[in-house]
Amino acid sequence: MALDMKSIKVEYKRKIEQRKMGEKLFVLEVIRDLDEAIDTICEAMTDEERKDPFAEDLCPYFGILWPAAEALGDFISKNPGHVSQKHVLEIGCGLGLPSLVASQFANRVLATDFHPDVEEYFLRNSRHSNVQCEYTRLNWRDEDLIHERFDVVMGSDILYEGKHPREVAQGLIRFIKPSGKIILSDPGRNYLQTFLKAMQEEGFSEEMHLVPVKDKEIFIFVFSKITE
C-alpha cells in the first residue's frame, strides 16, 4: 500500500525571500534550509514509512526557490506577450513565483502541484505578494483531473528523472489548445536533450533563450506546434 502523503504533517522552519520582477516586488515564504527540512520529515516517519518507495515524494523540494523558477518568472516579466490575456497552467509550481508573475498579465492562471504541502505555501505567497491566483492539487500524469485546455502551459526544472522526459512532453501537450504554447525552464539537466527530441517527435519547434540567475544560466524554451 502506497504511503498516504497526507498522513505525515510537519512544520518546517521558514524564512522570507523577496524578488523584484519588473516593477513588482514578490514576497515568498520559503523553507529555511532544505537539508534541515529533509531531516525533519525523515524523523517524523516511522521505519516502515521510510522504506516506502513513495517516501521520497514527501521530501519538501518544493520549498526553496530554485534558479529555474526564478528564471521563468524573470522571463515572463520581461516577455509578458507570451501570457498576456491568455489562460495559463503551471505544472509543478512549488512556491509559485512564475504563476504569481504571470497573473499580472494573463486572463487566468491556474497553479498546480502534487505535493500535499504546496497549497499552504502557495496561498501564503499569493497573500504576501498581493496577487490573486488559482491553485489546485494535480498529478500532471492524470489528465482527467483537468478537462480545460490552456493557451500556455509552463513548468520549471521538471526533468529530474530518467522516465520523465517523454512522459513530461506528452503530459504537457495534453493540456494545451491546438495553437497553444509550452514554456519550460531548465538548468541543463541530463534529460533535457531527451525531452527536446521528444518534443520534436511530437511536432513542436522550440525557441531558446538564456536567462542568468546569480552565477548560472538557465535555459528557457518556448515550444510551438509546427503547422504545415
Image (tube, helix red, strand yellow):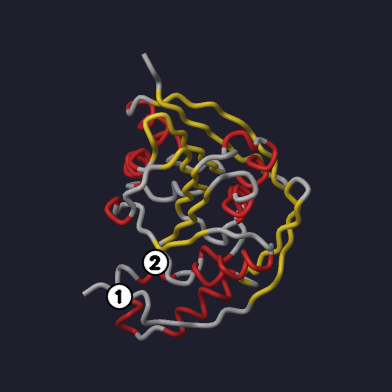
Q: Residue at x 72, y 45 (%)?
A: 215
Q: Which residue is mark 1?
A: 3
Q: Quadrant of the N terminus?
A: bottom left
| Apparent side of residue 132 relative to residue 19 in the rendered image (left or right) | left
Q: Label 1: few (<14), some or many (≥20) within 10 Å?
A: some
Amino acid type indicated by mark 2: Asp
**Looking at the picture, how far across and down is residue 37, in whole percent?**
55, 75
Q: Which residue is mark 2?
A: 57
Classify 183 as above or below 60: above
Query: How far separated are the C-alphas under marks 1 and 2?
Result: 9 Å
The residue at the far right in this view is 23
Q: Nearer the viewer, residue 179 or 12?
A: 179
Amino acid type indicated by mark 1: Leu
Do the numbered discs 1 and 2 sit on residues whose CB atoms are within 8 Å? yes
Q: Label 2: few (<14), some or many (≥20) within 10 Å?
A: few
Q: Quadrant of the C terminus?
A: top left
**Looking at the picture, how far across and down is residue 211, in whole percent?**
66, 38
Quick one: label 1 or label 2, which is nearer the N terminus? 1
**Looking at the picture, how far across and down is residue 212, in whole percent?**
70, 40
